[in-house]
């Protein structure tokens, strides 16, 4: 299974019926494709849409209906489109139940960095609405590859990149494992199919303990 699909499928299992859910652009946008049967939620796009529907066919896409990643969307019955200021206000005021964000790094204190890398001496591209989502959402789920292309851990003791949100992440889902964020330590809950505990230990910089219920992801 493709690693990004695996992460999206596992993240979808964290969503409960009736919730209002923001999907960050990138990998999290795939989560809506894998909702468990019987789960009905309302998806939010930070650029100003409540009620994001399935991705349209290319021939049916409209340029003025997109998510925050500029990907075409459809609307479900009862959807609402609003200006960005109204959308950000809803994000900051606790209206959202869950936010699923892509990440560059996360750490054992529940910090997340997802907005900037340094190129030519400058940090870019920009923080966007992720900071507001981290502040205003009770449950933040981070989705990312466990290690970078060089094999270096992205699950860290302390994030090295500029933070998007501090102490906000509750659950971390990677292509190797699922962690719950505890008190300055991660709790390893699940491993991906075919991934061993020793492999996770090798690829994880952060301190973690293994849950008594440690098991394979059920996808």
Image: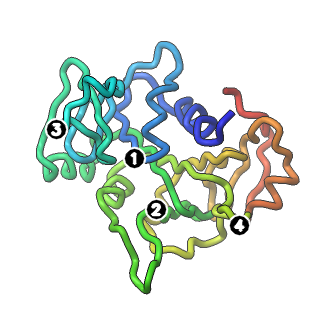
Q: Nearer the viewer, mark 2 or mark 4?
A: 4
**Sooner in the amino-acid sequence: mark 2 or mark 4:** 2
At label 1, counting other C-alpha atoms closer than 10 Å, the crowd grade (few under 14, some 14-19, many 20 or more) is: many
Q: Nearer the viewer, mark 1 or mark 4?
A: 4
The quarter in which the N terminus is drawn is: top right
Element type at mark 3: loop
At label 3, counting other C-alpha atoms closer than 10 Å, the crowd grade (few under 14, some 14-19, many 20 or more) is: few
Mark linked to residue 114: 2
Element type at mark 1: loop
**Sooner in the amino-acid sequence: mark 3 or mark 1:** 1
The quarter in which the C terminus is drawn is: top right
Measured in 3D between alpha carbons, the distance from the residue under mark 4 to the one under mark 3, in whole angstroms, is 39 Å
Residue at far front of view: 59
Q: Please name the residue that numbered disc 1 is placed on.
A: 24
Mark linked to residue 150: 4
Q: Do the numbered discs 3 and 2 sit on residues whose CB atoms are within 8 Å?
A: no
Kindly indicate the quadrant of the structure image that contains residue 184: bottom right
Q: Do the numbered discs 4 and 3 sit on residues whose CB atoms are within 8 Å?
A: no
Element type at mark 4: loop
Percent from the top left, x then y, of residue 205?
73, 67
**Sooner in the amino-acid sequence: mark 1 or mark 4:** 1
Element type at mark 2: loop
Q: Nearer the viewer, mark 3 or mark 2?
A: 3
């Amino acid at each position: 299974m493709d690693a990004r699909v695996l992460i999206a499928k596992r993240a979808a299992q964290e969503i409960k019926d009736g919730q209002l859910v923001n999907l960050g652009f990138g990998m999290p946008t795939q989560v809506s494709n894998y909702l468990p049967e019987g789960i009905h939620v309302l998806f939010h796009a930070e650029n100003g849409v409540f009620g994001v529907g399935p991705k349209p066919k290319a021939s049916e896409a409209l340029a003025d209906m997109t998510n925050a990643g500029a990907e075409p969307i459809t609307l479900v019955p009862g959807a609402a489109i609003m200006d960005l200021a109204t959308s950000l206000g809803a994000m900051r005021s606790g209206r959202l139940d869950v936010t699923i964000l892509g990440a560059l790094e996360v750490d054992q204190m529940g910090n997340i960095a997802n907005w900037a890398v340094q190129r030519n001496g400058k940090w870019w591209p920009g923080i966007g609405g992720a900071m507001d989502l981290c502040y205003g959402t009770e449950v933040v789920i981070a989705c990312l590859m466990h290690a970078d292309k060089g094999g270096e851990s992205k699950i860290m003791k302390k994030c090295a990149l500029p933070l998007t949100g501090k102490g906000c992440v509750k659950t971390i889902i990677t292509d190797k494992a699922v962690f719950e964020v505890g008190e300055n330590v991660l709790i390893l809950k699940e491993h991906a199919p075919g991934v061993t505990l020793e492999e996770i230990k090798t690829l994880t910089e952060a301190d973690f303990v293994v849950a008594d219920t440690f098991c394979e992801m059920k996808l």
